[in-house]
Image (cartoon, helix red, strand yellow):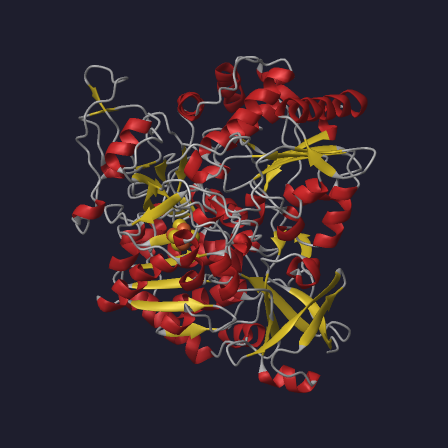
Amino acid sequence: GEHSPASSDPVDTHCPYCSLQCGMALRPLPPGGGPGDGPGGRPGGVEVVERTAFPVNRGALCGKGRTAPAVLSSRVRLTEPLVRRPDTGRLEPATWEEALDRIAEGLESTGRAYGRDAVGVFGGGGLTNEKAYALGKFARVVLGTSQIDYNGRFCMSSAAAAHQRAFGLDRGLPFPLADVARTGCVVLVGSNLAETMPPALRYLTELKEAGGRLIVVDPRRTRTAEQADLHLAPRPGTDLALALGLLHLVVAEGRVDEEFVERRTSGWPETRAAAMAHWPELVERITGVPVPELRKAVTMFCDAESSMVLTARGPEQQSKGTDTVGAWINLCLATGRAGRPLSGYGCLTGQGNGQGGREHGQKADQLPGYRKLADPAARAHVAAVWGVEPDDLPGPGRSAYELLDALGRDVRALLLMGSNPLVSAPRAAHVESRLRSLDFLAVADVVLSETAALADVVLPVAQWAEETGTMTNLEGRVLLRRAALTPPPGVRTDLEVLSGLAARLGWEKGFPADAEEVFEELRRASAGGPADYSGITYRRIAEEDGVFWPCPESVERDDSEGAESLSPADSTPADSIPTDSAPTDSMNAGAHPHPGTPRLFLDRFATDDGRARFAPVSHRPAAEEPDAEYPVLLTTGRVLAQYQSGAQTRRVGELNEAAPGPYVQLHPLLAERLGVDEGAPIAVVSRRGRAVAPARISRDIRPDTVFMPFHWAGPGRANTVTNPALDPVSRMPEFKVCAVRLEPAGG
Ligand code: SF4
């Protein structure tokens, strides 16, 4: 049920930002008590209260989560729709009626003139499950377009593809995060979680306190790398070769778990042969990581009784991201470190609903329940839930970058929700020109983001604390974000927006504005699919503080519960999983509620034959390697005080003070060669454009590489420079490596 905003009891909910989805409670404040962002801030708001009961963060929050209420009461938040006036060319206030009419007309007339696929939809990995579901349904049913994708394509899609290929199922972590603290060795590849999700650092600290080892793979000595027992700093774009070199040593040192490989995997001979072609000395030459360090890593990884590899954006955001992740999965499989308690491969998803956002149908090739859009049985199931014919559902569309690249050409009108691609997409100046060339652009957002500023219609939508909905965190734990406030007058929820647009386009029914009603339909649509939510209800999530998918509607008690059984180590009350919860309303007699699935693959993998599949991958260079003209590598990433495109966090005073703008991190040797001092502006120039930001000179980065955080627009926009070369499987752009030259940018 909805919380009554009249009450001032703290409301249990979750952070608006990253995939850790930290638990927090919000206490509504009397008018005038909101944190705002200085004079003129809006009255009211909420204060954050610690919620220690939620097991993932046990009350801890990073600065982003702690200050999130400031965006609720920010004076720059949008509270009325804006419509671009033909006479002035400016965005000016309008009524909701007019704004929604304009959007319905803009989308419909484009479809009529150019065909349905000339209308595009772009979503976001921060949208709730209900919104992601409703947006996918809206695109395919109401607009009848195949052209929908979302910014999660830029986030973890390579890990998702590699997960599917190896295990037949993609859930970021196939085990609860708490298992990370109890394994013997963790290899963290391309994750700076000390800055991106600081409360998660606790699990690594506990790991080390219990005698476990931490290996961090990152071209930079980040705050996370500082915690490592062993830090490997490969040249950007070579972690695939690094993983192959480790696998080579595993074979050479006789550390292959032959019994596991024989019983639970397929494809080993080809993979073994590929690894044997990558001699340690060759791998040292490619990666820059000395052979003794490779040996040390293999010893740490294999000597531990259990071990894990966790990847994040580093290996994933490459034009060979799927194969790079596959190479790390190979290492787990060859050593028997998968499908066993406290061992395995996992992806640390980035965006708040990075996991759920990819399961419910806003992805170009997918239908709810993580079903494949090209699969006839999946189409039939979902079409029946939606009350349409399977043949009426369009086929798979373009991936995110390809969709943006087609704007103004094949795709002439766009509805965008929960994303700011003008900052977050690669080759951003080009994306900006594509957005500007659209016949019609509608954007729903909480502030006038850089992308919203280009729109023909801007809709002001509610924020996380003002609406109820579910999120699925990086562990596959489905969580309930509860409303603690009513939205300010003039603001509507994304679900209300879709409901209003659907009604205008002839769909009076099928697009409810109530989140729980949408979730009930999502349950049916997902039933029987890989990401089965049918046994999950708002009531259960509230009672159990999260339920892990897959969770079918019921299970016979005498079933083998092997796949769901908990490891002997799992006795901590904070994260024990109830298996005897009260039957839900919809239970059949004789059947029991499914407990949810904290741990996957313990008995079998989700492939047809139950075996995990090795991927026989080989090293290949980045799409763009340094040359005489562009001799330096650029890699991009995140800082502690900002989140993604900064649309929210750049509006929070405290965060802006901590991280006011972009910078170029470079080694003293490079700085000297260039003749720049600390703080002097440097231009980072690629074939796609230039970004200018102050130098930050540091020995924590390789001398052949510079780093820029990507949270800002304007002259320092890192993504102006990045390369949209796509991974052939996941369609992930190569954010993590491109060739640049550096120039002093005057003073
Ligand atoms: Fe929010 Fe992530 Fe920070 Fe937790 S770690 S408070 S979920 S941004």
The percent position of residue 357, horizontal first and vertical second, equals: 49, 38
Query: Residue shown at 74%/42% (left/top)?
Result: 435
Residue 672 picture location, percent across and down? 65, 87
- Tell me which residue sits at (27%, 68%) in the image: 208
In the image, taking residue 299 as reference, residue 266 lies left or right, namely: right
Between residue 155 and residue 296, name the one nearer to us. 155
| The C terminus, quarter of image | bottom right
Whether 28 is drawn above or below 395: the answer is below
Taking the image as drawn, is residue 253 in sight? Answer: no
Q: Is residue 494 left or right of residue 540?
A: right
Q: Residue furthest right?
A: 87
Res. 62 in view: yes
Q: Is residue 615 above or below residue 138?
A: below
* Percent x, y of residue 66: 39, 53
Above-or-below relation of 384 to 200: above
Write the residue at 64% across / 47% down: 421
Q: Quadrant of residue 136?
A: top right
What residue sits 35% from the left and 50% below the top? 262
Among the 4 quarters of the image, the one containing residue 183: bottom left
